[in-house]
Image (cartoon, rainbow, N blue to C red):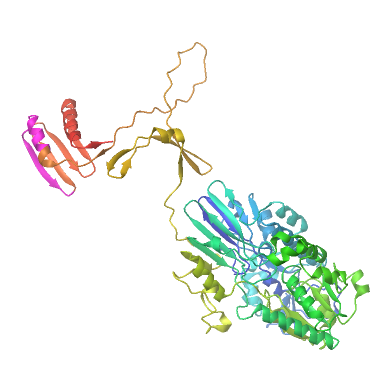
Amino acid sequence: YCLSGHPTLPCNVLKFKSTTIMLDCGLDMTSALNFLPLPLVHSPRLAKLPGWVSKDGNTFLEKELKECAGRVFVDSLPEFCLPERELLDLSTIDVILISNYHCMMALPYITEHTGFTGTVYATEPTLQIGRLLMEELVNFIERVPKAQSATCWKNKEIQRLLPAPLKDTVEVSTWKSCYTMQEVNSALSKVQLVGYSQKIELFGAVQITPLSSGYSLGSSNWIIQSHYEKVSYVSGSSLLTTHPQPMDQSSLKNSDVLILTGLTQIPTANPDGMLGEFCSNLAMTVRTGGNVLVPCYSSGVIYDLLECLYQFIDSASLTTIPFYFISPVANSSLEFSQIFAEWLCHNKQSKVYLPEPPFPHAELIQTNKLKHYPSVHGDFSNDFKQPCVVFTGHPSLRFGDVVHFMELWGKSSINTIIFTEPDFSYLEALAPYQPLAMKCVYCPIDTRLNFIQVSKLLKEVQPLHVVCPEQYVRPPPAQSHRSDLMLDCQPPTMPYRRCSVLSLPFRRRYERIELLPELADSLVPSEIKPGISVATVTAVLHTKDNKHVLRPTLKLAPAPPPSKKRKRVLEEPPEHRAPKPLLSGAVPIEQFLATLQKHGITEVKVEDTPDGHILHLQDEDTLIQLEEDSTHIICDNNEILRATLRDLVLRFLQKF
């Protein structure tokens, strides 16, 4: 079941062997681009924006919708597009598997408001950094309260009349405002921590295992398998050498089905080239006395950006320029990255034993080149020196401290904003700040798998079937001629979209059953062909927690003598008769007739049927039906004759 239409923020549900497993719960924040930014400090520019008036002069929405640079924005707290909640009953979900911290942002909506009572599995860095990102989001939204929330524009009849892009936004009924910190804590209390390659049993039916996916600290791919079937879930993986542990590819082999999602959003951009461009644009701006603004998440690519700058500062003689990292969770994020040593790549792990901090940003902080602050208020305003480089959130430019810097620096053409996060269209992000004088540079850094790497990976692990979002089976709309920017594999992939339900193409054929030793001991194999022996088993099948065991049948105990006292009536165990022998072979018709003659039965009429023969014993008024796999003797009220005929038939069959 696909609950999210965004291929890099997936939310899927897999029903497999009586378990219901949710794979990720990504929150699509691109809906926030339709809202006005939330300024930390009162912004006269935003306050003066005119309300929207419809073509026929109707002003009923002017409080909810504001016009800015030819675009219409909703003046309300931003809302996010949730995973689909009507497709199936989410309270039936047994477990949620999280692949990385960007794909868990919708967790509180699922665990707190759907009756979910299961467990969430994630690695420790995913949980801790995911907590930071959620805390940061709640903080960004809650510190700029809005008096009213806009709801009228969402009415289907009204939405049709609005200008694009509001007119074309889909699923607006599912959009919800941000959760609270209380909901975050409650949701995260349901998380159980797991390590790479750890095997976790679910109800005895299925075993799940997280594998390193190489994309971010603690990011995982998941294997979901029973004794005879295997499903792999590959989401947000990377083969590039960055700070996390490398991707584990070999464990994905022999999959019946591979669910593939979270590929790179910028297939044409090379991350190394983008890093180089980032550094050179930054240096160029700072040398001319301008400031650089980098809208980013508080964890992930920022570690690589700081490392790249660390190597670049001295050669570009930028040693006097201050770097500021502003986020409510800046301090925790920088510290966490240093303590999750076992989740880092090998050369960063080895530094821990020297002992040296694995990331160079520790040294940038010690030498005062990098300073971090919870927000622009307080200490930051005292220490603030220009020209400088500021890393801050949110990449959508709709909330967070970045809004303040956009208002502060946007009017001057010596400043530059550099976009490194690929999640939001930079033109859309800048729309409410137009007209804008500051320079804008787009250097998206996305280390996830591109289509060339994916085809190579699929050739190596060779899954029988590949399931993926429909966006991957055709070239991107903007480059429809690029047939290399799509998945092309054999057999063809099974594409899905939001709200689609697919039957996965594997048949469950076998189930594993255990024989208890004393039962195995009692079996008597008899050879029916050279090299092939057969034994019959009579046993009680005992099933508990999806584990099946064959146990010997109970011997009947002698009945106790009746006692005077009234006892509770015990349920009688079922009676076990000795099993009848199994029969094999065929009854040869000529010899059988000869045998009947010896026993004085002479008047026999033989009739051929498609399945065998019918013998009509005319004097005895009896029928014998001989078929390939059964024999029926039909005679009226003559038990002695029936038994005689049965014994004659049995002479020709083998028993075991």
Count of labels shown?
0
Name the residue at 81% across, 88% down: 413
Is residue 597 or residue 521 the one in the foreground?
521
The residue furthest front is 354
Q: Is residue 585 above or below residue 41?
A: above
- Residue 238 place in picture, x, y as percent: 62, 69
- Residue 322 place in picture, x, y as percent: 86, 77
Q: Is residue 27 visible?
A: yes
Q: Is residue 47 visible?
A: no
Q: In this view, does 371 lie above or below 219?
A: below
- Residue 17 place in picture, x, y as percent: 50, 51
Residue 593 in magenta stretch? yes
Drawn side of residue 323 relative to residue 258, left or right = right
Q: Quadrant of residue 280?
A: bottom right
Is residue 322 or residue 38 the one in the foreground?
322
Residue 37 in magenta stretch? no
Name the residue at 18% across, 37% down: 652
- Residue 456 place in picture, x, y as percent: 53, 72
Query: Magenta part of the protein: which range?
Result: 592-610
Is residue 445 or residue 153 the one in the foreground?
445
Q: Quadrant of residue 414?
A: bottom right
Task: Quadrant for the C terminus, please.
Answer: top left
Task: Quadrant for the N terminus, please.
Answer: bottom right
Name the residue at 51% across, 74% down: 487
Q: Quadrant of residue 45?
A: bottom right
Drawn side of residue 598 relative to residue 503, left or right = left
Is residue 84 or residue 76 the one in the foreground?
84
